[in-house]
């Protein structure tokens, strides 16, 4: 075994409330403060002996605190994204200033799509990853010369050089469990969101997604469209161990892009989880057959996280969602009848959107009536087909580095003839208000609060954060209009 450098993996400090979205610094501040597990960093951290993982946002660690820790490490690997890149580049510079001999690298979708630009802007970074970076991190940490490491870009004689492309990882069972990293380096109670029971743990059982949604970042940049999975035996063994290691955890979430893409596999996983007696949830497209939902529900499934996205069929077609409204209605009815809760996500501002389609989507959301919702603004991330469309058609209102305001709140980045970014932005506020301020919905949420003191505390906190977020965003909007 090679001698490994003392290696630190870091999700750098950033905006207050920045949740990293899906565990990977993907998004921005949420309407309600929440945090996902840094699984994309935990995986290589589990593979590099003697390493440490710092997830600064949920632990409320400052730049000074993390930089002080980084002084003691030889190799420092930062996870970055389009929204947080400028901030992360500044953090890399601080780390390099305090520890000039350290080898500093950046990983994630943004640097993978824009490696040359990223190195030119983040001058303190010695290398950036291109593609999946798990084995790249091992090679770097083992001291392998940069010119011999596949899947990176680095500087050589003042020029940015790219090495041989690293092949996609097919053997998911070869990965070690992230559980030991979770227990060693993370503060479990600090990870929470509005729709999962607290505390929770999240995992991936596979990578990639066969769907071709034009806006979705990971399949188009790192994960690919081939769904590569761990064996059912491997998943069962890890969940059995997770239950024993973290008895305080009330729910386990499978963060695969679409766990339900492989129906026979998810049914078998459900049966194995049922024998373990755990409560679990997962991502799903709104097309899961009723018979499969029945099997999942009977074996511990509590909630689906579902990308409804829009209530207009043409907008769904434009984003290549691959779902039909009639199938979505059937799926939602099945979930209600079978007692499976749904957290529904929606996007405003995709190609084909109009003021009329926004109203259709709001009405559709109220008709589907998921337990909770998340409404996002269409975000054209580099590397996605949506970004290509936006640049070719002149839809971009803001450049990629301006997807967020100074407080980390998402901008409406796209403009269309007859539908301005301001109109799309206002649609999000209207969406939330119309969905949650219905008497039926308010009564249902209030009933849940009365039945569980912990739920009441969470809902009151979330309500306070939600209204604060809306007020702050209105102030930002007015300030932008006056500038």
Image: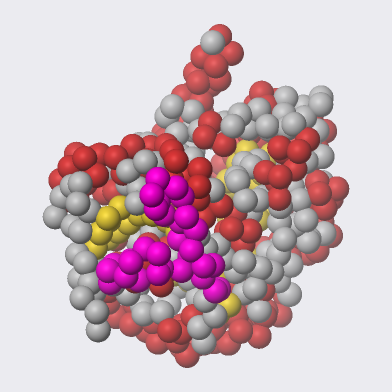
* Residue 24 part of the magenta segment: no
Judge whether residue 281 can be spotted in this image.
no
| In this picture, residue 304 sits left or right of residue 201 | right
The correct choice, above or below, for 401 with respect to 56 in the image is above
Looking at the rendering, the stretch of residues picked out in magenta corresponds to 139-168
The correct choice, above or below, for 212 with respect to 82 in the image is below
| In this picture, residue 356 sits left or right of residue 121 | right
At which x and y percent is residue 342?
60, 59
At which x and y percent is residue 192?
38, 54
Q: Quadrant of the N terminus?
A: bottom left
The residue located at (15%, 50%) in the rendering is 71
The picture quadrant where one finds residue 188 is: bottom left
Which residue is the extreme one toward the front?
157
| In this picture, residue 157 sits left or right of residue 168 | left
The correct choice, above or below, for 255 with respect to 32 in the image is below
* Residue 149 part of the magenta segment: yes
At which x and y percent is residue 177?
36, 78
The residue located at (54%, 48%) in the rendering is 114
At which x and y percent is residue 394?
74, 31
Q: Quadrant of the C terminus?
A: top right
Which residue is the extreme one toward the bottom?
233
The picture quadrant where one finds residue 425 is: top right
Which residue is the extreme one toward the top?
482
């Amino acid at each position: 075994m090679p001698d490994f450098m003392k290696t630190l993996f870091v999700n750098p400090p950033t905006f207050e409330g920045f949740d990293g979205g899906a565990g990977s610094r993907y998004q921005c501040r949420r309407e309600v403060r929440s945090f996902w597990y840094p699984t994309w960093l935990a995986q290589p951290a589990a593979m590099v002996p003697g390493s440490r993982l710092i997830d600064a946002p949920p632990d409320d660690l400052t730049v000074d605190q993390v930089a002080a820790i980084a002084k003691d490490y030889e190799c420092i690997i930062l996870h970055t994204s389009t929204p947080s890149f400028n901030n992360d580049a500044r953090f890399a510079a601080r780390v390099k200033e305090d520890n000039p001999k350290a080898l500093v690298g950046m990983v994630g979708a943004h640097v993978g799509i824009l490696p040359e630009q990223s190195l030119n802007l983040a001058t303190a970074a010695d290398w950036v990853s291109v593609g999946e970076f798990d084995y790249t991190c091992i090679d770097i940490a083992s001291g392998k010369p940069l010119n011999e490491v596949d899947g990176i870009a680095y500087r050589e004689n003042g020029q940015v050089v790219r090495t041989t492309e690293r092949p996609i990882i097919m053997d998911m069972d070869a990965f070690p469990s992230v559980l030991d990293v979770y227990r060693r380096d993370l503060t479990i109670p600090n990870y929470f969101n509005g729709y999962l029971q607290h505390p929770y743990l999240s995992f991936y059982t596979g990578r990639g997604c066969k769907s071709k949604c034009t806006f979705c970042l990971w399949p188009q940049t790192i994960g690919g469209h081939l769904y590569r999975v761990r064996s059912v035996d491997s998943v069962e063994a890890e969940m059995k161990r997770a239950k024993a290691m973290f008895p305080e955890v009330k729910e386990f979430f499978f963060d695969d892009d679409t766990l339900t893409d492989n129906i026979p596999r998810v049914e078998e996983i459900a049966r194995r989880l049922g024998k373990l007696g755990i409560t679990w949830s997962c991502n799903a497209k709104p097309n899961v057959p009723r018979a499969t939902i029945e099997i999942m529900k009977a074996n511990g499934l509590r909630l689906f996280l579902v990308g409804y996205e829009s209530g207009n069929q043409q907008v769904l077609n434009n984003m290549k969602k691959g779902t039909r409204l009639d199938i979505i209605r059937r799926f939602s009815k099945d979930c209600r009848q079978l007692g499976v809760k749904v957290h529904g996500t929606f996007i405003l501002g995709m190609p084909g959107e109009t003021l009329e389609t926004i109203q259709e989507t709001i009405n559709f959301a109220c008709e589907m009536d998921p337990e909770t919702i998340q409404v996002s603004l269409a975000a054209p991330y580099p590397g996605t087909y949506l970004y290509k469309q936006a640049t070719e058609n002149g839809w971009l209102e803001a450049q990629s580095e301006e997807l967020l305001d100074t407080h980390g709140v998402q901008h409406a980045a796209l403009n269309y003839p007859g539908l301005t970014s301001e109109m799309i932005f206002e649609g999000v506020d209207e969406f939330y208000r119309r969905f949650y301020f219905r008497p039926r919905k308010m009564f249902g949420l209030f009933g849940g609060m009365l039945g569980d003191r912990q739920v009441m505390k969470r809902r009151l906190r979330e309500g306070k954060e939600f209204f604060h977020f809306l007020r702050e965003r209105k102030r930002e909007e007015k300030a932008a209009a006056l500038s």
